[in-house]
Image: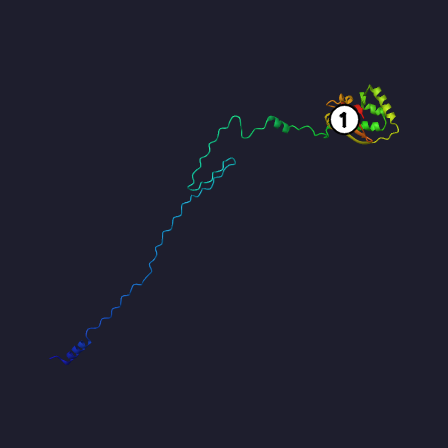
Amino acid sequence: MPTPVAVLLALAVAQSGPAPEPPERPAEAPQATAPRAEKAPPAEAPEVETPAPPAPRGLGAQPEAAPRPAGASRAPSPRPKPASSGSSLSPSPSPSASTSASRPGPPAPGAPTPERVRVAAAARRFAEALLSRRAAAVAALCAQNFSFDGRLAAGAEQVRARWEEVLAARDGVEDALLDLSVLSAAEAQARLGKPPKRLAALLTPSAWVAVADVSGHALLIVFARQGDGFVATAIHG
């Protein structure tokens, strides 16, 4: 017969029953995540050829051609045409042109030259002696043969005597030199026209003509070279 203690233990065990198992934790639902968009691979940039820095060129080097764009077709280079024997791109200067450029041209009409200056000085001395009525001084500035308006005086004595007559006829007349210019023979013919016959033979290419305005009256005095100076050979007016 079981003891009271065993009975109590058996009742206690029967009432308590098996120990309850802990409740199971509900399974966690997976978190909804938005689908990640796949990144597209980066587009590869077209390779661009980086031109190398130009090398230093000398003064006489030819310039480098510019790089052609990709895909551009190369234009055919024109073939040089053979130069014809009768033509040239840059005509060479003619010898006469270079010679004339380096050689000074003739002086302009009326330009002061050493010869013109000397003739002008001789003409002024002649005009001053004429206006002061000094026949001997005028005759000393004349050639041995002198033409008085076509009338020829031969020799120094005849020239002096003729001047004394001319100046004596104008005694008491006050004359003044208003203007005096010197022209070469070519300039005198271009400005005054064809000379009269009595002066034509004296107007050689080397002759000079002094145009004097004496109190409103024009006098033409022809000068020619004699030695190192110039002497008067004729007067007209």
99 to 18, vertically: above or below: above
Left or right of 20, for residue 79: right
The picture places residue 205, in percent across and down from the top left corner, at 72, 23
Quadrant placement of the C terminus: top right
Picture mark count: 1
Furthest toward the right, the residue is 172
Which residue is rendered at x = 60% and y = 26% of the image? 95
Left or right of 60, for residue 135: right
Going by the numbered disc 1, the residue's amino acid type is Val
For label 1, the residue is 209
Q: Quadrant of residue 233?
A: top right
Furthest toward the bottom, the residue is 4
SS class of the residue under badge 1? strand
Q: Nearer the viewer, residue 181 or 23?
A: 181
The picture places residue 190, in percent across and down from the top left corner, at 72, 27
The picture places residue 196, in percent across and down from the top left corner, at 77, 23
Q: Quadrant of residue 89?
A: top right
Furthest toward the left, the residue is 1
Quadrant placement of the N terminus: bottom left
Colouring rule applied to residues: rainbow
The picture places residue 69, in percent across and down from the top left corner, at 44, 42
Q: Quadrant of residue 228?
A: top right
Q: Nearer the viewer, residue 117 or 234?
A: 234
Q: Nearer the viewer, residue 104 or 133?
A: 133
Left or right of 107, for residue 7: left
Q: Residues within 10 Å of mark 1 (few under 14, many from 20)?
A: many
